[in-house]
Amino acid sequence: MEFRFMMRKTTLGIMLSLFFVFSFGNAFAADEPYGVDSATVKNSERYDTSAISPKQVDAVAGNVTELSLNATAVTKYWQGFYGNVTGEIILADASGNNFYNWNLTVPSGQVFASRSNGVTWTTINCSNDTHVSQEETFLGQTSTDPDSVSNTFTLTSHPSFIIGSTNIAGCYSTKAYDSSGGQGADEFWQILLSDGVNTVYSTIIEDSAISGFNNLPWHFELLVGEKGTDEATTPYYFYVQIE
């Protein structure tokens, strides 16, 4: 089951409420990510640079004046998703009739987003330099851009986790900001993955909601690339894996 979001150029952050179902059965790979059952967009906004008033500096004939200027620009290449995760583990037949149900009050696992609705999870692993370069090309970046993939995913010390039989460790990664206005000690990790063809952006679900970038508690924050060189929206498909 797949769900996608069309990202608008006016979007900076989207809050998601993810619902997932874990079904025991011989037709389901329990240790691989799967599509979320529902995803609700609750809020979407961006920083408005047009609201910033120009600053006045008086010119005096005969003077030369040193200035220190500071300005803010909104990235053309990145979208932020954030939200909370609720769900349940079920034992059910193929028709969805529950034999038993375990509600999850404190979920754990990972959230994934990809532009593909057919990620090959059996080949998923860390993105290598070739994958990074390909992603930058798709997004219209060069590696020297300050907000390029290369200059964003600069860490490799994220907590490890397992997808299928693959141990995900030492991947290019970064951390989204928390309520401190910067990167926290060990939270809101962003991990860059690839199945060899498709880029997969991933994050680790926090065991309990942590105060995020806007001082509100969230289970996850997820950074994904957006092709800011055109006006088209970019669809992303969301998957989860619960441990």
Image: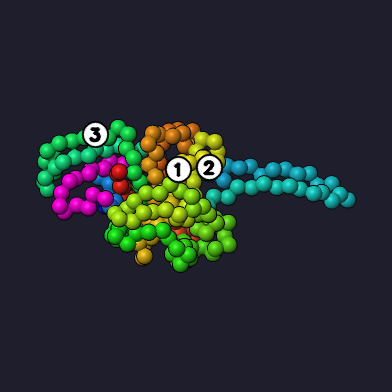
Is 190 or 80 nearer to us in this picture?
190
Q: Is residue 13 left or right of residue 243?
A: right
> At 45% from the left edge and 63% from the top edge, which residue is drawn?
128
At label 3, which amino acid type do we have? Asn
In the rendering, at what x and y percent does residue 218 appear? 41, 36
Q: Secondary structure at mark 1?
A: loop
Query: Magenta stretch?
Result: 18-31
Residue at numbered disc 3: 103
- Is 25 contained in the magenta span? yes
Instruction: Please identify the quarter of the rendering in which residue 200 is found.
Output: bottom left
Q: Spatial distance from mark 1 to mark 3, Cα to Cα?
A: 24 Å
**Relative to 77, residue 84 above or below:** above
Q: Are marks 2 and 1 in contact (CB under 8 Å)?
A: yes
- Asked whether residue 20 is in view, the answer is yes
In the rendering, at what x and y percent does residue 108 appear? 34, 40
Residue 183, disc: 2
Residue at numbered disc 1: 188
Q: Spatial distance from mark 2 to mark 3, Cα to Cα?
A: 32 Å
> At 28% from the left edge and 41% from the top edge, which residue is drawn?
19
Q: Tell me which numbered mark, 1 or 3, is placed earlier along the sequence.
A: 3
At label 2, which amino acid type do we have? Gln
Q: Secondary structure at mark 2?
A: loop
Is 23 or 199 nearer to us in this picture?
23
Q: Residue furthest right?
A: 62
In the rendering, at what x and y percent does residue 37 appear? 25, 45
Q: Tell me which numbered mark, 2 or 3, is placed earlier along the sequence.
A: 3
In the rendering, at what x and y percent does residue 167 appear? 36, 54
